[in-house]
Amino acid sequence: MLPAGGGIMFDKEFLFGASISGFQFEMGGKIIDPNTDWFKWVHDKYIQESGIVSGHLPEDGPNYWEHYPEVHDLAVKGNFNALRIGIEWSRIFPRETFEAKTLEDMEKLADKQAISHYRGILEDIKSKGMKLMLNLNHFTLPLWLHDPIKVNRYGDFSQSGWLDDRSPVEFAKFAAFIVREFDSLVDYWSTMNEPNVVANLGYFQRESGFPPSIIRPELWRKALENEIKAHNLAYKEMKKFTSKPVGIIYASNWVDGDESREDAMNLLSWYFMDSIRENMDFVGINYYSRIRVVKRNEILEGEGFKITWKTLPGYGFACMPNGTSRSGLPVSDTGWEVYPKGLYEITKAVCERYGKPVYITENGIADGKDSLRPYYLISHLWSIEKLLEEGYDVRGYFHWSLIDNYEWAKGFTMRFGLVHVNYAEKSFTPRPSFLLYSEIIKERTTEKYKEFIKYPHALVE
């Protein structure tokens, strides 16, 4: 349970908004982007038959690409003062850029229509009075860099994504190009979203449905190292063209349990971030639930790492959907325990370890009935108020997400939106939690709602 706070107010500079990405939201209309690894992955019939993906297709999505003014209007109605969005590398560069040596060379290869359309999206956000955080990579890679079917089915690593030692340089070239194009419209830059998830799920957890879905621990390490290089290179290139803050968005795991939790925290939460600590102006924390661990009887070892723990079922991400965790806390549609104390603890730890400003860049719940989301919202925002009261430098909260979206291998089965999407009609209906969030933003505190997180779920003390 979370320690009770004192009802400190969020100041007027605190950013309240939501996060959306490219691939998960953009498609659903006439303009399709088939040039990503994920697009090819979820369309492959053998991958669909294997059951590791839903069979749902992103081109049936909410169509943010065409409906962005309507989506941005919802943000305004919700009293948001910020939005975090993404940009698709494959839309800007559908063809390979290996031979491009200068930004002028890159410009010749860039899709001018895509650049113009993204500019319209960014301008619309700014015209509606919101701050803009732009993230440059959210899981997907251009197909010319990563063909997961070749890797998975044929062992052909000629287009191997983050395993390719050229990938850090190619990403840095892309990042520099985008900053040069759009810096006047952007307030905060992020290089990547959850790079650890891409490596962990792609090379360790086949059941996740993440490409290329092979169990190769040495490749996990290789992908992670190249992502570290990519961020560090991109940061340095981006700072040549911008004075705006450049950070990274990380899947920040709070691990509890026995003494093995320290090893788990070091590998899951600190290794990557420690490797880039000199090249980030802020940390974006994505937090959904905790991980509870116990020491393994047999240690798993690989090149440069040891896994001394195993995850305990019934806690955190390892619960049965729509039930109750072993701690007696509610569980979401995805089987994730509602555990606001984890956000408090991981944010505190990140602030103390890195001394950088922190933004909560994703926090939310799959809850199609909107029955738990109000409790989730209040309890997690309460935890941030507690941190502010204690003097920690937390500067914003971006809920995941504003509208329902394509949730990767799970397709459209999981609804994370404050706003319901009718995918057939491309219509948007605010849920009650949207109205609650809007009121909290207007009042700049959760104080008047705190009783709702003590009963019926004892989420705070």
Image (cartoon, rainbow, N blue to C red):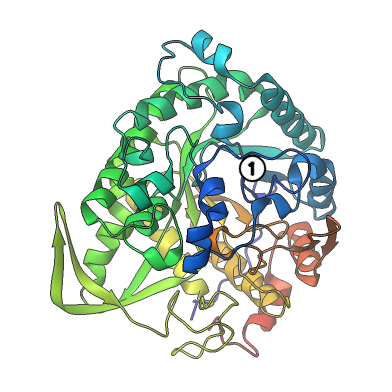
Residue under the image location 41 percent in, 11 percent down: 101
Quarter of the figure with residue 124? top right
Q: Is residue 215 above or below residue 371?
A: above
Q: Which of the two residues, 132 or 44, is positioned nearer the viewer here?
A: 44
Vertical position of residue 258 compared to residue 73: above or below: below
Residue annotated with mark 1: 85
Residue at image point 32% right, 56% down: 203
Picture quarter containing residue 13? top right
Q: Nearer the viewer, residue 81 or 38?
A: 38
Where residue 31 appears, x then y in whole percent? Answer: 74, 38
Report whether 208 appears left or right of 67.
left
- Asked which secondary structure carries label 1, the reply is strand
Horizontal side of 9 relative to 460 (left or right) equals: right
Which amino acid, mark 1?
Ile
Number of other residues with Cα within 10 Å of mark 1, as a class: few under 14, some 14 to 19, many 20 or more: many
Q: Position of residue 288 (x, y in %)?
A: 51, 66
User: Do we see residue 155 in this rendering?
Assistant: yes
Q: Residue at x 62, y 32 (%)?
A: 187
Q: Residue 91: x and y, percent? A: 61, 32
